[in-house]
Each structure stands twice: as structure tokens, then as C-alpha cells.
Image (cartoon, helix red, strand yellow):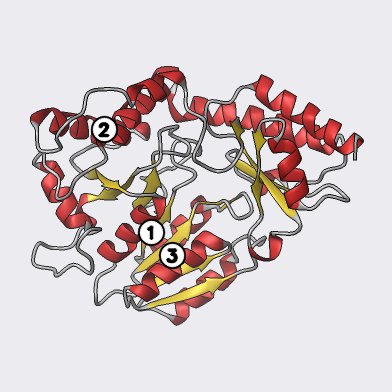
Amino acid sequence: MILLNPGPVNLSDRVRNALLRPDLCHREVEFSQLQSKIREQLLQVYGLGSERWAAVLLTGSGTAAMEAMISSLVPNDGKLLVIENGVYGERLSKIAKIHSINYITLSHAWDAEIDINGLVKLLDENADITHLAVVHHETTTGRLNNLAELAPICQEHGIKLLVDAVSSFGGEELNFADWGITACAATANKCLHGVPGTSFVILQRDALPSVATIPRTLYLDLGTYCQQQDRGGTPFTQSVQTFYALTEALEEMAEAGGWRTRHSHYNQLASLVRDGLASIGIKPLLPVSSSSVVLNAYYLPDGFSYEKFHDQLKAQDYIIYSGQGNLAQSIFRVSTMGAITSADMERFITVVKQIINNS
């Protein structure tokens, strides 16, 4: 089965076999060494140094990393601005609300790009904003939000930038230095091609709260995790087998040429799909200039509900993904993540053509 959903992804044999490594107690030195290796590998993806930066590992989905980042790094006397232009931006707001964080939103239609003029106006009217949270790749639509455009605005206003990079880390550019990123949340089972169960936050060490700060949450407190992981420990049981898979996936990616090579491969696959679907009249939701290489959204072909289209593709061993909310009845989504080849995508286009022609 070829998974064209935005995670979990198809695994390489190498990563899948890593799950069969020996059972391991998370309090033993071997686990400490494994954890430390992964933390360093994650920093190396974008060339970050461990003196200024830390990768904090969590057992949980990407949403766990999002929640840990927001709840741990926005102080009680801080104020958060959340940019919403899709489901996952709105999820950041839900996290802030649940944890009683002082926040406001800059809301957009799901298919809209960020209103920069509106952002500047809102910041000028709210001089007490300390942090801005934004989704990098909004998989609701496949939009890649322009962080390079946001960066100078945040820097000018002295605002710390918190990034949901759950579906972009390892597949799209993340310029931590030039964009002034304070922290980003991500996961193992998307562009890194690991398995679900491990997520992480990469953060500037000086963004962590002081030891005296009472955390908002027990399990997701990044300060506790970072402090113990720096000493080789872990506050809670980690998912050992998914750690095995993640270290192998990171090694596999580094050997292949790193995130730039992965980005190029995704771009090749995404272009193949976009051009192939265009040849039979299936239009993309967003222009290529606004889209990530990780996932693109397309309008459903005439005469097909999502369920009908999905089921016929599944019968041919392809899993696509539905739209969400008010897009559920009009679009489908195709991801390029995972151990997927050009031949897989060429066959996908052939299968789509056959389904439409036989309808």
C-alpha cells in the first residue's frame, strides 16, 4: 500500500528493520547513548550547534510537541499571537486556550496567505505581544507560509517566533538564524521517514523558563525534559523502538544528502503528480508558488465524491487524504513523503486516469 497521506509514511526496509533491535530499559546507559545520538542528529539536520540549541525528545505525536512548545515557552506574563490559516494554526490557539495563556489570533480563510499588513497593524496595536506562533507548512491546504517574510517583523518588534514545523522539518528550508526562530516543533513520522510515537522540539536554550518557574504541565514540560536529557536521563518512559527507527531514518537521510536532497526528491514527485493531474483536468487548490513540496491539495474530479475516489484508489493500493472542514467535499490531498519512488507516482497518475476514464 502506497501511503499518500501526510503521515504516517511508507518506511524503508532499513528503518523498518531497526524496530527489531533488542529490547532496552530506558534507564540504562545504552538508551542514554541512543537518546543523545538522536538529539545531536536532529541538530545536524539544519547545522545547529548544541551550545546554543537543544533538541528535546518526547514520546507522543506532533501535537504533543506543539503543546509542549506553547505551554512551556510562553511565560505567565507573556502574550501570544497565533496566526491561523488552517486547522493546525487553529490547533495552536486551542492549546493556548486550554492552558489559559494570554493570546490573540490573526485569522484567515484556510486558503489564504498571511496578511502581512494586517499582522503589522495588529502588532502595532498590541505592543505587549511577546511570542508569535505560526504553522510553517499548513497541511490543511498544502500552503507553505512564508517565514522569511515574518522574520524581520518579529525581530523589529522584539517577538519570539515559535514554529509548528511538524510537516516541514527535514523537507523544507528552515533558516533558524536568519529567521530568528526561537523554537520549532516537529515529529519523526513525516519528512524524517521514521515511525509515529516520537516527536521533538528544537529550541534556543535561553528560551527555556528558569528552574524556579512552576510549569503548566507535568508530562510536556520542556524544561524538565531538557535538563534531564542533558544529563543523559529522561523524566518518563520513552518509546524505545521508535527511537531506534528515528536514529536509522536520520542516518539514512544524512547519507543520502540531507534535507536539501529530500526537498529535491519531494519536488520531483510533487511536480510529476501536479503535471499528470493537470493533463486530465484536475486542478490544484493553490498555485505552485504558494505550495510546499511535501503535500498538495487538488479539487476532486467531476462526478466523484471523496469516498468514491478514495475507495477506488485504495483498491489499487494508493491511500489519498481527504480535505477538512468546509473543504471535505471538494478536495483531496496527495503527500510525497516516505519511501516513495517516481515509478510509484507515475503509476498513481496512470491509475487515476483509468478510474476517471472508466467512470
**Image quadrant assignment for residue 63:** bottom left
Alpha-carbon distance for marks 1 and 3? 13 Å
Q: Give 200 or 151, whichever is nearer the viewer.
A: 200
For disc 2, the marked residue is 38
What residue do we see at 47% from left, 27% from top?
11
Disc 1 vs disc 2: Cβ atoms closer than 8 Å? Answer: no
Q: Nearer the viewer, mark 1 or mark 3?
A: 3
Mark 1, residues whose alpha carbon is within 10 Å: few (<14), some, or many (≥20)? many
The residue at which mark 1 appears reads as 161
Q: Is residue 296 left or right of residue 158?
A: right
Label 2, residues with CA under 10 Å away: few <14, some 14-19, many ≥20: many
Is residue 245 visible in the rendered structure shown here? yes
Q: CA distance from mark 1 to mark 2?
A: 24 Å
Q: Position of residue 284 (x, y in %)?
A: 76, 47
Q: Residue furthest bottom?
A: 125
Residue 285 shows in this picture: no
Alpha carbon separation for disc pair 2 and 3: 26 Å
* Position of residue 4 measured from the top left corner of the image (x, y, whole percent): 61, 37
Asked if residue 260 is positioned above or below residue 85 in the image, the reply reads above
Residue 319 vertical placement versus 209 (above, below) = above
Q: Determine crowd level at label 3: few under 14, some 14-19, many 20+ residues with C-alpha closer than 10 A.
A: many
Specify the label residue 92 is tagged with: 3
Precedes in sequence: disc 2 or disc 3: 2
Query: Hey, what amino acid is under mark 2?
Result: Ile
- Percent position of residue 327, x then y: 70, 60
> SS for tag 3?
helix
Asked if residue 10 lies left or right of residue 290, the reply is: left
